[in-house]
Amino acid sequence: MSQSKTFHLPDLGEGLPDATIVEWYVKEGDVARLDEPLVSMETAKAVVEVPSPVSGKVLKLAGAAGDVIATGAMLAVFEPDPNLPQRAEGQDTGHHHGGGHAAPAKAAASDDGGEPPTQPAPSEARGGDAGTVVGAMQSSDAVHSETAISVGGVKAMPAVRALAKKLGVDLARVRATGADGTVSLADVKNAAASPSSLLPAASGRTGPAPAAAQSAAPVASRGVSRDDAPQRTPMSAAGKPMRTRPPGATAAASGQPEQLKGVRRNMARVMADAHSKVVPTTLVDDADLHGWIGKQDITARLVRAITVACKTVPALNAWFDGDALAVTRHPHVDVGIAVDTDDGLFVPALRNADMLDARGIREGINRLRLQVEERSIAASELSGYTISLSNFGMFAGRYATPVVVPPCVAIVGAGKLSHDVVAVIGGIEVHRRLPISLTFDHRAATGGEAARFLKALLDDMALPQ
């Protein structure tokens, strides 16, 4: 038997310590070919195809779908086949385990344009109108440009395969509307919403079991019908209150610890880091929108007001280096727009927001949100903003204490619109008002600077148009 070769999980260009297995394209005993898809891995930003580094028999795989693999850890073991194409010794594979950001062959590093930040890029992620919340995630400057590949006769991007797996949709039965017969995210979502639109199953082939059937499988495998399964009750058979079982006491999926993965896993790290490094202080007030003329885009107005406040008080449109005790004030305004998704929170940067009109702001936000939803956004667009906005009021809540993620100095939070009774000369009126929360790092800005920033923002929001 020829000598085996161990393939370690490469640095996928995210600067993160691990990644989650989404789907293997081979199984132990299969013959993998050089540079063909081996596995798809989910990082904090994207679902990335990792190609096979050799041609040969697969002896061992690191884990199953859902398992978290540390960068540099064993991913697969091969028995190279000298009769099949192999990469020449010393030839660059694109896989790196150190601090570099080179990506695998199927996820080539590229740059989206623009100058790289001169400070460490902020670690965050989330977004705009469709609902925004407080949170953040890290990302490196590397960008993955994934290509749709054909597996089992179905051509689809890695993120599309991940979504289909999550929704229990058989990709082989989805009508492909993308270029060159590629299955798109919209195709998968439509198939999940309307199962009747699925193509007939091939003879002898069955698709993934529906989620309900999958969840019932463990019960059925034990020879117990769903009707006979133990029912949850507040009292035990002895008439005493039921106690919560400690973790590990039962194999039941419900109520047990679940390991964070992908975006949420990185967000937890970033939030802990922000908590340990920032001295946060929050000011709150209400923007009075009573003078507005006609229907206006609230988010676009918020972005405009932030840029005006940044020009008025540059101290909050800045990065702070806590180790060097140095402040970098920016002449431009790049606003990080928090975007909420089922996978977690993203904060793409709306570049040069101070140079955009209302239409440009709206188009930019829509573009960023679409790229986040499709998981096609460049990593460089998830970093380098100078101040951020969390429009959590799209869901609920008046005021909050948004989290400032270093190196940024400030974040603006917008609460839920309300109609309030306001005292005016000669009586009272009902005004539409927008609650505003401003959290800032008190190491980098004074209370007076923050208050003046908030006043400039409120004054701009109060303008008729």
Image (tube, rainbow, N blue to C red):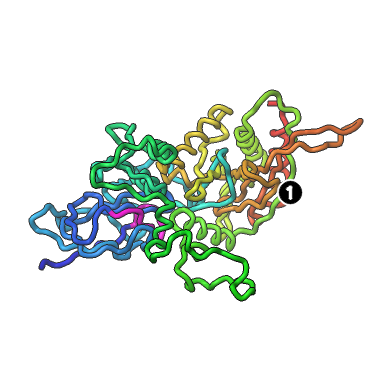
Q: Residue furthest top?
A: 294
Query: Is 353 or 339 nearer to us in this picture?
Result: 339
User: Does the segment drawn in magenta span residue 40?
Assistant: no
From where the camera sits, is residue 147 visible? no
Say left or right for 287 vs 359.
right
Question: Badge 1 is on which residue?
Answer: 448
Q: Is residue 108 depicted above or below 186 in this figure?
A: below
**Nearest to the observer: residue 453 or residue 58:** 58
Amino acid, disc 1: Gly
> Residue 113, percent across and down?
40, 38
Q: Let me know if residue 16 is in the magenta part.
A: yes
Q: Give the mark count.
A: 1
Q: Is 169 situated above or below 14?
A: above
Quarter the N terminus occupies:
bottom left
Determine the residue located farthest toward the right in the rendered image.
426
Disc 1 element: helix
Does residue 50 appear anywhere in the picture? yes
Quadrant for residue 429, please give it. top right
Quarter of the figure with residue 336: top right
Relative horizontal placement of residue 225, taking residue 32 as reference (left or right): right
Query: Residue at (71%, 27%) from the top-left corner?
Result: 292
- Look at the image and tell me in which quarter the C terminus lies: top right
Span colored in magenta = 11-24
Residue 368 locus on image (x, y percent): 48, 38
x, y percent for residue 276: 58, 63
- Name the residue located 57 percent from the left edge and 70 percent from the top edge: 244
Please tell me which residue lies in front, 127 or 405: 127
The correct choice, above or below, for 423 with respect to 20 in the image is above
Measured as percent of width and height from the top left, residue 345 is found at 51, 49
